Image (cartoon, rainbow, N blue to C red):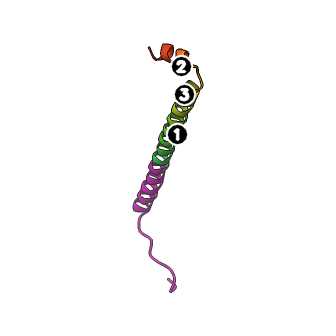
Amino acid sequence: MTMGEEVSGPAGPKVTRLLYFVGAGFITVLAINKWREWERQQQQQHHDQTLNDQSSNHLPKSVQKSTER
């Protein structure tokens, strides 16, 4: 054996660590995508609410009263 070589152990623990790492990455990506989807829904709801408020302000008062009932 030369100076730079290390004795490698069984492949089982290395494969297990690799699978844990890949699994953690997968879960992280799912969490990030879910967070982005939630943020997008919040922005869309806010945008829709703003549009509804603006459109109701442009209606004549008689129409606004009838739509509020």
- Residue identified by numbered label 3: 52
- Under mark 3, the amino acid is Asn
Name the residue at 52% across, 19% down. 64
- Under mark 1, the amino acid is Gln
Q: CA distance from mark 2 to mark 3?
A: 15 Å
Front one among 33 and 14: 33
- Residue identified by numbered label 2: 61
- Residue identified by numbered label 1: 43
Question: Within 10 angstroms of label 1, few (less than 14), some, or many (20 or more) residues?
Answer: few
Which mark is in front, 3 or 1? 3
Residue 21 x %, y %: 45, 57
Left or right: 23 with respect to 47? left
Where 65 sits versus 47, above or below? above
Tally of numbered discs: 3
| Nearest to N terminus: mark 2 or mark 3 | 3
Q: Is residue 14 magenta?
A: yes
| Nearest to N terminus: mark 2 or mark 1 | 1
Picture quarter containing residue 11? bottom left
Q: CA distance from mark 2 to mark 1?
A: 29 Å
Q: Which residues are magenta?
A: 1-28
